[in-house]
Amino acid sequence: MEKKNLDWANLSFSYMKTDKRFVANYRNGAWDDGQLTDDDKVVITECAGVLQYSQSCFEGLKAYTTEDGHVVCFRPDLNGQRMEDSCRRLEMPVFPTERFVDAVVETVKANLAWVPPYGSGATLYIRPYMFGSSAVIGVKPAEEYQFRILVTPVGPYFKGGAKPIVIRVSDFDRAAPHGTGHIKAGLNYAMSLHPIMDAHRQGYAENMYLDPATRTKVEETGGANFIFITKDGILVTPKSESILPSITRRSLLYVAEHYLGMKVEEREVPLAEVPSFAEVGLCGTAAVISPVGKIVNHDQEICVPSGMDNMGPVLTKLYDTLTGIQMGRIEAPEGWIKRIA
């Protein structure tokens, strides 16, 4: 298929309308078959559950052109399973993982002309989402829902490579101890907007959120999990019931252990331990790994030994290995790559 005439190498990380999107509706206790549509407009009642009580959840994943010219997705089944968990927690009807993956494949196939070519640094970002669409005035779940998938070509999250960032320890809490921090609910991200904008106004790229119960342990940022590298090369990642189970983080743990022969630990990480780490990174779908060079905790500055110039050597190996798997340069574990075209 002939590609769209875009400047692929200079795309920003922003929305661009593409040809098709997938829509399925839940009514009378069941999902319809769903369909592709040209229409990018969502029409709902002014009293829709999503507008009144923020009943919504979403996912994020990417389609890539591999080195051998195939179009693939990375572990979409895990996105589907995580969305099932989000739906259950928000009293929304589950859109089954198998149907989720089929809908992702169908939507990407309908937009193959928008999938950036290999080597451009760009990808096709895929955004599945669900919301309460029927009228709700009392505080209760909606009775009808819409599941949609949009796609948009995006450039690399960091232009010119990933340079270490400066973050701060936030005075805000990201999630309640027994709240919704472990699911991908839209309301979590609404709550993070003021803290991240406040951080930006203070000159920081991101927030480090601490556990909401004791405020002594590292949790995550507003949109990414933490990974730490000890001075003796162990990968450590925070364990908590109130952080989002990142698919990128889980993949990096596997890559570290099975491809690079590293020891990995998923455990509580006291804030007091952070100065002892050799490398610090954030991980997620958008950037894969974002290196952290400095962490500011009020009057204390924690300067990460890997520095402010480049990503540290261990994080670089992790990044190169995982992106190599995603792009087809390195053989993937069974089931990780979903071939679309």
Image (cartoon, rainbow, N blue to C red):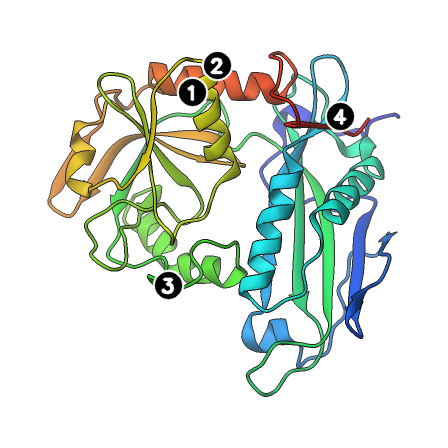
Mark 4 sits on what residue? 71
Label 2 Cα neighbours within 10 Å, binned few <14 / some 14-19 / many ≥20: some
Give me the residue at 66% from left, 55% from top.
129
Residue 102, labelled with which disc? none
Helix, strand or loop at label 1? It is: helix
Q: Amino acid at mark 3?
A: His
Mark 2 sits on what residue? 259
Cα–Cα gap, marks 3 and 2:
35 Å
Residue 256, labelled with which disc? 1
Residue 178, labelled with which disc? 3
Q: Amino acid at mark 1?
A: Ala
Helix, strand or loop at label 2? It is: loop
Cα–Cα gap, marks 1 and 4:
25 Å
Q: Position of residue 258 (x, y in %)?
A: 47, 17
Is label 3 in contact with label 1 (beta carbons under 8 Å)? no
Q: Is residue 231 above or below residue 236?
A: above
Q: Is residue 291 above or below residue 46?
A: above
Q: Nearer the viewer, residue 145 or 50?
A: 145
Q: Is residue 13 left or right of residue 36?
A: left
Q: Is residue 111 above or below residue 309?
A: below
Q: Is residue 247 above or below residue 328?
A: below
Is label 3 in contact with label 2 (beta carbons under 8 Å)? no
Q: Is residue 36 left or right of residue 52?
A: right
Is label 1 in contact with label 2 (beta carbons under 8 Å)? yes
Q: Earlier in the sequence, mark 1 or mark 4?
A: 4
Cα–Cα gap, marks 3 and 4:
40 Å
Q: Position of residue 264 (x, y in %)?
A: 35, 25
Cα–Cα gap, marks 1 and 2:
6 Å
Q: Earlier in the sequence, mark 3 or mark 4?
A: 4
Q: Amino acid at mark 4?
A: Val
Q: Position of residue 175 (x, y in %)?
A: 37, 59
Cα–Cα gap, marks 3 and 1:
31 Å
